[in-house]
Amino acid sequence: MSNKIEAEIKEEQMTAFLNDVLKKVEHEADPDELARLRKIFKKCIPLGRRSYVAAFLTKMLLSEENTRRPSRRSRSEERAERPSKNRAEENSSRTETEKTEKIEKAPRIVIDESLAATIFIGIGRNRHVYPRDLVGLVASVAGLERERIGNIKVLANYSFVQLFKEDAEKAIAALNGYDYRGRKLSVSYSKQRSDDKDSESEASSESATSEQESALQATEEVSQTLV
């Protein structure tokens, strides 16, 4: 009796499997790929044996599927273990987050103005650069300790990094021309104004003034030509 029930179960499983395969063949499979495989199949398998080989392949696939399928007991064990694993992962994730926050919130060293030099780096917020990125850049490329990096100000198109005077030349030599995020950096000693916002607006003003001067010069040249 049990053998009969087992045979019925296997038949149901095989029927469901073949129906699923047929649907995928009709709606999902690549016709060209199937045609190529069918050609190989016909070439290798004699006509009278093809249905037997197909049946045997189906049996193999079902056996592999049953082998991969976890038992009910293992599923229940997984459900019992899952909460503890999730709690452990949450605790681990919380710890890493707290560490990161502590690093990011750690106050930057204050360098005495008499000992400090500020360098200009030609990249800013528009390139999705933030102070922590510049700390990592200066530390890894210029080889400076994080404790020797002072105040950092990131503006739209460029940034200012405060260093000790004896480190500034080393940082400029290492970073100037360095390929960072798809562009070569322009790094030099800063001519930063007292207020960075004023600096940014003055830079725009200087650019506008330069454009106006060019326009006036062009007008004068045209006037002289007409005369």
Image (cartoon, grey):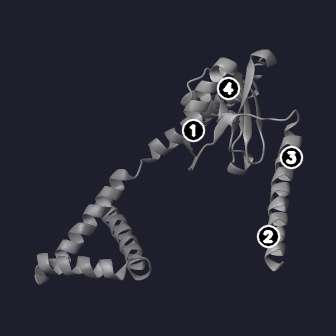
Q: Is residue 54 left or right of residue 124?
A: left
* Nearer to me, 99 or 24: 99
Residue highlighted by disc 1: 82
Q: CA distance from mark 1 to mark 2?
A: 81 Å
Query: Residue 20: x percent and y percent?
Result: 41, 73
Q: CA distance from mark 4 to mark 3?
A: 40 Å
Q: Quadrant of the C terminus?
A: bottom right
In 3D space, how far apart are the residues under numbered discs 1 and 3 (Cα atoms)? 60 Å
Q: Residue type at mark 4?
A: Lys
Q: Are marks 4 and 2 in contact (CB under 8 Å)?
A: no
| Secondary structure category for the residue under label 2 | helix
Q: Residues within 10 Å of mark 2 (few under 14, many from 20)?
A: few
**Mark with earlier residue (4, 1):** 1
Residue 181 lies, in percent from the top left, at 58, 47
Q: Residue 99 shows which numbered tag? A: 4
> Which secondary structure lies at badge 3?
helix
Picture disc at residue 202: 3
Q: Amino acid at mark 2?
A: Glu
Quarter of the image holding residue 48?
bottom left
Which of pointers 4 and 2 lies earlier in the amino acid sequence?
Answer: 4
What's the residue type where badge 3 is placed?
Glu
What's under tag 1, amino acid-wise?
Answer: Arg
Number of the front mark, 1 or 2? 2
Q: Which residue is mark 2?
A: 221
Name the residue located 80 percent from the left edge and 35 percent from the top edge: 192
* Viewer-nearest residue: 150 or 50: 150
Q: Nearer the viewer, mark 4 or mark 1?
A: 4
